[in-house]
Amino acid sequence: MIVDCAIYQDGRRTDGPADFSDALDEARKSGDAFLWIGLHEPTEREFDLVRHEFGLHPLAIEDALRAHQRPKLEVYDDSLFAVLKPVVYESSSDTVSTDELMVFIGDSFVVTVRHGDSAPLADVRSRLEADPQILAHGPTAVLYAISDAVVDHYIDVAGELQVDLEELETEVFAPSGGGDSSNTAASIYTFKRQVLEFRRATGPLTAPMTRLAGAGVPFVHQEAQPFFRDVADHLTRVNEQVEGLDRLLSDILSAHLAQMGVRQNDDMRKISAWAAMAAVPTMVAGIYGMNFDHMPELHWTWTYPAVVLLMALAVFGLHRQFKRRGWL
């Protein structure tokens, strides 16, 4: 559906015709105005009118309707098409999810298509309307403001993930051994999937931002290149943080598996030590349970306590040896 539609002249919102075609003609005639239309999860029928009025390319329309696109930047004859993926971080469940945001800019128009509820378009429009000097630069200013808002939120999400990683690291390397090993491994794996989801949004966006920061991109003013370079720098920092998170998660998982191996070895040593101590009295008792006829000591009065004492001393000696070597 159409969320908002307005003409901006000299950076200020003005009332214009309700018809898209008339509004676009009016914006183009003035020479210093542009039309901005915002759509939220439009159907093919709803998008047909926009497609005809603005001459948008069919391939770009298909991408905008179907969503599930990678971040990218495509240049067509009559428009520039950009795809961004805003990220949502749910602090209650420590999960990361992504939505999609498509931006068409062309001669005196901007069309934004939002899939999901996390795209910061309402805030971006409000901030731009509060700063007419920036909005006066036309569609390029809108594309920059949207890109900047999305990437700035990436930085916030990366910070939240860093905090979660530190908590997970503390849990894994806790003196108690990190609790249930299977649950800890599952937590690490789940966290790694969240980082991968985040990486799918930030990584592919590097090439479009780098391209916008350079020269020769249609419908983008040269004066905007330093601003897009700033966005690209922030995105580079985010990508470095994401790569660092991924590496640390791999190291934590390896360390956790090593801890599990050491713990299992310790358990095996303890089991082996107790089994050895149990074997001595079992062996002695087994010998005396064979009912030989000629065992002279059986007729000795102190045979029973002597044998019991012998078994006790043997077990005690083994216990001391195992304890000294750290097996118990």
Image (spheres, rainbow, N blue to C red):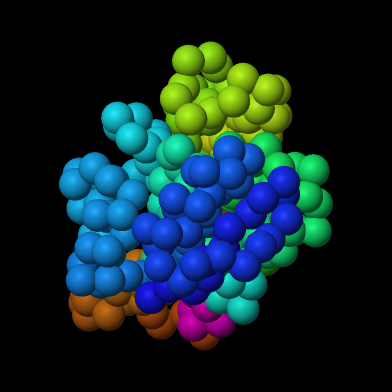
Residue for point 66% across, 62% down = 14
Q: Nearer the viewer, residue 108 or 75?
A: 108
Question: Could you say where residue 300 lies in the image, as x and y percent from the top left?
Answer: 47, 80
In this view, 166 is above or below 119: above
**In this rendering, would 129 be left or right of 42?**
right
Q: Is residue 28 magenta?
A: no
Query: Quick check: 228 above or below 299?
Result: above
Numbered disc total: 0
**In the image, what residue occupies the spot 34% across and 30% down?**
75
User: Looking at the image, which is closer to me, 9 or 122?
Assistant: 9
* Main secondary structure along the magenta-highlighted residues: helix
Q: Which residues are magenta?
A: 302-308
Q: Position of residue 165 (x, y in %)?
A: 64, 54
Q: Is residue 148 left or right of residue 51?
A: right
Say which of 43 and 327 sits in front.
Answer: 43
Q: Position of residue 226 (x, y in %)?
A: 70, 23
How far from the left and from the top, in percent, is residue 26? 51, 52
